[in-house]
Image (cartoon, helix red, strand yellow):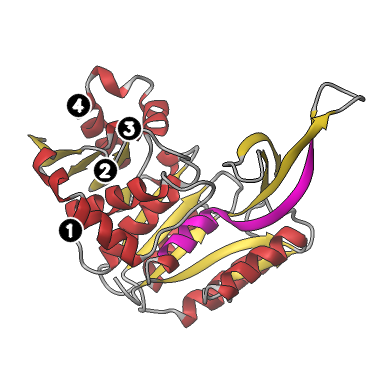
């Protein structure tokens, strides 16, 4: 997986964490006053999927848009610090970079707990300037990548019309993978999709639990998608591919610390493994291990190659609990 390029069209989001220690209850209103301790900004949303590919040793080639604001500048700086290419990131002066601000509080030596979150949200569809930036980057990356990723958080940058330009820029036989928060059906025809259970149920209009195997097969038909990986939280993952339905139990404990960004880790790991030649099952297994690691970390997290290797070694017993069914 080391050094494998992955083109990633993503809604760029900034995750800002503000932490403090409890001071007292305000006399002005029944709210807690925190004494400010620290503040950090990390890649979130589609940008977190990009960061996960980089953390695992891959070479993400991101396409996206940020605003000419503090969050946008800090997000680009985060990419540059991690050695991630930024030539495909367009800056739009009239756009506010989507930013999720989490306020956390707790004792000086205790784990900080999230108290409240507020979101700075804006949406934008690629205009002439953004498309020019994307086209230039794709031309420079021509035939480098075998895998392209769509990480759609609903902020407008990830459009179905971009699927074909991604395919054209990739090497022959390249595959497009999609993770779409709100409109997976609009991306029918991609090579693989990684919805969570809630997203799958929204598209199907019913619970997956009623008939998991049948629901997965129906969803795959609707999406005209050769490979479908449904993440199911503490119930693990279900892979629908070829003539098989494969259920993967969750790696690690079901008592998680924080699920923030776990889906980004899944699509990032799945994509990078696919770029390295993994089969859908091998890629799904690695994504399952990776997801089990990051949910034990607080905040928006990534994992590195050593952590993934350790998880595979420690969790070898998981393979004996994989169940198969004919499609």
Q: Which one is earlier in the sequence, the residue at label 1 or at label 4?
A: 4
Q: To which residue does mark 4 refer?
A: 214
Is 46 inside the magenta-drawn segment? yes
**Residue most toward the bottom?**
140
Q: To which residue does mark 1 refer?
A: 279
Position of residue 227 relative to residue 70, above or below, is above
Which mark, residue 327? none
Q: To which residue does mark 3 refer?
A: 234
Position of residue 106 relative to residue 38, above or below, is above
Disc 1 versus disc 3: distance between alpha carbons? 24 Å
**Residue most toward the front?**
109
Disc 1 versus disc 4: distance between alpha carbons? 23 Å
Disc 4 versus disc 2: distance between alpha carbons? 24 Å
Label 2 neighbour load within 10 Å: few <14, some 14-19, many 20+:
many
Q: Which one is earlier in the sequence, the residue at label 3 or at label 2?
A: 3
Badge nearest the viewer, 1 or 4: 1
Q: To which residue does mark 2 refer?
A: 251
Label 1 neighbour load within 10 Å: few <14, some 14-19, many 20+:
few
**Residue most toward the right?**
28
**What residue lies at 32% left-to-right and 40% top-to-bottom?**
223
Magenta extent: 33-53
Residue 128 seen in this snapshot: no
Q: Of residues 91 and 315, which is closer to you in this image?
A: 315
Q: Main secondary structure of the magenta part?
A: strand
Q: Which one is earlier in the sequence, the residue at label 1 or at label 2?
A: 2
Label 4 neighbour load within 10 Å: few <14, some 14-19, many 20+:
few
Query: Which quadrant, please, contains the N terminus?
Result: bottom left
**What residue lies at 28% left-to-right and 42% top-to-bottom?**
252
Disc 3 versus disc 2: distance between alpha carbons? 9 Å
């Amino acid at each position: 997986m080391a050094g494998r390029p992955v083109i990633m069209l993503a809604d760029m989001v900034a995750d800002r964490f503000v932490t403090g220690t409890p001071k007292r209850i305000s006399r002005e209103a029944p709210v807690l006053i925190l004494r400010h301790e620290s503040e950090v900004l990390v890649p979130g949303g589609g940008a977190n999927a990009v960061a996960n590919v980089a953390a695992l040793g891959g070479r993400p080639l991101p396409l996206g848009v940020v605003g000419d604001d503090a969050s946008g500048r800090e997000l680009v700086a985060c990419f540059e610090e991690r050695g991630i290419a930024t030539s495909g990131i367009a800056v739009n002066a009239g756009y506010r970079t989507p930013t999720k601000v989490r306020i956390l509080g707790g004792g000086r030596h205790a784990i900080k707990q999230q108290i409240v979150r507020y979101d700075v949200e804006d949406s934008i569809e690629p205009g002439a300037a953004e498309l020019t930036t994307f086209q230039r980057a794709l031309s420079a990356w021509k035939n480098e990548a075998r895998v392209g990723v769509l990480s759609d958080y609903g902020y407008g940058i990830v459009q179905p019309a971009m699927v074909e330009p991604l395919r054209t820029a990739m090497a022959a036989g390249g595959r497009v993978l999609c993770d779409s928060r709100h409109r997976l059906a609009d991306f029918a025809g991609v090579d693989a999709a990684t919805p969570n259970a809630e997203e799958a149920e929204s598209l199907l209009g019913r619970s997956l639990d009623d008939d998991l195997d049948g629901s997965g097969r129906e969803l795959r038909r609707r999406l005209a998608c050769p490979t479908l990986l449904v993440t199911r939280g503490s119930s693990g993952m279900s892979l629908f591919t070829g003539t098989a339905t494969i259920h993967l139990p969750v790696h690690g404990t079901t008592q998680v610390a924080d699920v923030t960004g776990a889906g980004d880790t899944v699509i990032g790991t799945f994509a990078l493994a696919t770029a390295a030649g993994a089969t859908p099952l091998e890629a799904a297994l690695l994504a399952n291990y990776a997801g089990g690691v990051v949910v034990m970390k607080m905040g928006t997290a990534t994992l590195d190659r050593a952590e993934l290797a350790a998880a595979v070694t420690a969790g070898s017993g998981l393979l004996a609990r994989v169940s198969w069914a004919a499609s």
